[in-house]
Image (spheres, rainbow, N blue to C red):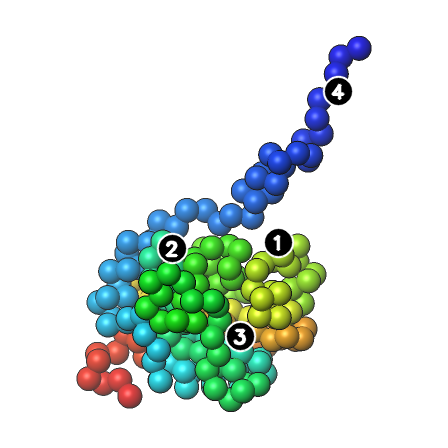
Amino acid sequence: MAATPPHPSSGPESGIAVRHLLLPPEDPQVRARSERLRALGIEARPDAELDAFARELAQRTGGCYAGVNFFLDADRQYFAGLYSAAQDAPVHVGPPLLQDPVPGRVMPRDIDMGICPHVVKRRRALVLEDIRDFPRFAGNHVVDAIGIHSYLGAPLIDSTGVVLGTICVVDPNPQPWGRAGLETIKAMAAELVARLEEPTDRRG
């Protein structure tokens, strides 16, 4: 009798296959994004104005944490703006990394270290009212590390078509953001992009 072939969903190869399905495609905008961020004067540093923007974002959506997240390169994402409603102060989103220029604000750009990389690749806003209802995202490291159960995010797409990063809101409880939440965060993303593209001497 011929040996029964292993089930395609068993063994270590299956784990690799599943992870492959969850990986967003390779990002073709990495170089263009880095160049655009430099041209706009956006650096890997905390920004008081963006912290204030994150605070407004949290207040308008009712989320506990909010952030303005730029993608430095192919490996890192950093939060130039951060806000925690629980502490009424900026919150660190991740453990310090080796050579981290802004301790606590930089995370690896990895599908297992946040949901924003998916938003960048989708180029569309995303609402997860209860992350546990979405197997693709429920196992993400930040869900347990930060204790979040809901996510609302939108891409920051500039006038040249480059996705600079995201703005996002998360909360430790499920949130009924729905269509209203999506429209709010998309409008605020467009508002922020317009502000970022203003000449430096006109910002403020």
Mark earlier in primary sequence (1, 3): 1
Q: CA distance from mark 1 to mark 3?
A: 18 Å
Q: CA distance from mark 1 to mark 2?
A: 21 Å
* Rendered position, 120 above or below 84: above
Q: Which quadrant, please, contains the N terminus? A: top right
Instruction: Provide residue 59's location: percent of width, then percent of height.
Output: 53, 86
Q: CA distance from mark 2 to mark 3?
A: 22 Å
Q: CA distance from mark 3 to mark 4?
A: 49 Å
Instruction: Provide residue 187's location: percent of width, then percent of height.
Output: 46, 76
Which amino acid, by three-letter code, is at mark 1?
Arg
Near-viewer residue (142 or 173): 142
State whether residue 83 appears in this view: yes
Q: CA distance from mark 1 to mark 4?
A: 31 Å
Dot 1 falls on a residue whose secondary structure is helix
Q: Residues within 10 Å of mark 2 (few under 14, many from 20)?
A: few
Write down the quadrant of residue 203 in the picture.
bottom left
Q: Residue at x 43, y 71 (%)?
A: 104
Which amino acid, by three-letter code, is at mark 3?
Val
Residue that carries the numbered disc 4 in the rendered image: 4
